[in-house]
Amino acid sequence: MVLTDPITIDGDERERIYGYVEAHGAVDTRQARRDLFPQDPHGDPQHERAFRHNVAILKRDGYLEEGEDDTLRIAIDLSDEREEFSADDVDVTIRPASQEDLTGIVGAIRRVVEEMTSIEAESVADALDHEDVLLRHNDVESRMFFVATVDGDVVGWAHLHVPKLEKLSHTAELTVGVLEEYRGIGIGSGLLDRALEWALENGQEKVYQSVPSTNEEAIAFFEDRGWTIEAVREDHYKLDEEYIDEVMMAISP
């Protein structure tokens, strides 16, 4: 299943199963059955077969996948291609993120927000903390992440949010960031390139973001890579009792 594909699931019980898994990120198959159908007698072979049949159909149709540890998660058709490079004696991997990266991504976002103002990134971290789910694909939104890792630890991220509202479905909102000690060696550019490549492959015609005018480093970074300033909203943010302009930037992948 591609994150931009429409969701067309036949059957109320299958819709409930998919919705439960999508909202929880990764769930134990047995726990999902207990939570979704508490009225069914535990261990009843007939009810167990019916549940397993619905899961099998969702897997067949590309909506769910099940790991060897009996964990269900939404099946997202992502390239497993990893970009690996070395710079300044640092070995970096850039790849699609998974639910297991959630804690590392939130931690990286929080650290970057402390170092430089990023209102949108802070909002993303708050949403992840609240939902405890990384990737989303439902009738309202799709949410995609790429990560940069060093020795298995997340040191940077790129996030794309795609609304399902038809009038905006050709667009995607971006946040991207790298921990301060890993900047200047190509990680930010690599994450940005990977995010824009994904947006292009999935039919997004415009990628946009908002940056506080005080974040001059970020504005220069994006302008150097072809992004344009579409508008400036004066005094849009209020930070420490000071009003800050919002710089709205965009690019066509």
Image (tube, rainbow, N blue to C red):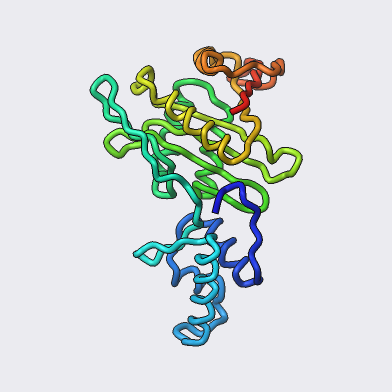
209 over 124 or under it: above or below = above
Give whichever of 212, 190 is nearer the camera: 190
Q: Give coordinates of residue 148: x percent, y percent.
A: 38, 33
224 over 133 or under it: above or below = above
- In the rendered image, is residue 198 in sight? yes
Q: Residue at x 39, y 41 (%)?
A: 81
Q: Give coordinates of residue 236: x percent, y percent.
A: 69, 21
Total number of numbered discs in the rendering: 0
Give whichever of 79, 179 is nearer the camera: 79
- In the rendered image, is residue 132 in sight? no
98 over 65 or under it: above or below = above
Q: Residue at x 37, y 17 (%)?
A: 184
3 over 190 or under it: above or below = below
Q: Give coordinates of residue 91: x percent, y percent.
A: 27, 29
Q: Residue at x 59, y 39 (%)?
A: 161
Going by the picture, which residue comes out furthest to the left?
A: 89
Q: Give coordinates of residue 10: x percent, y percent.
A: 65, 68
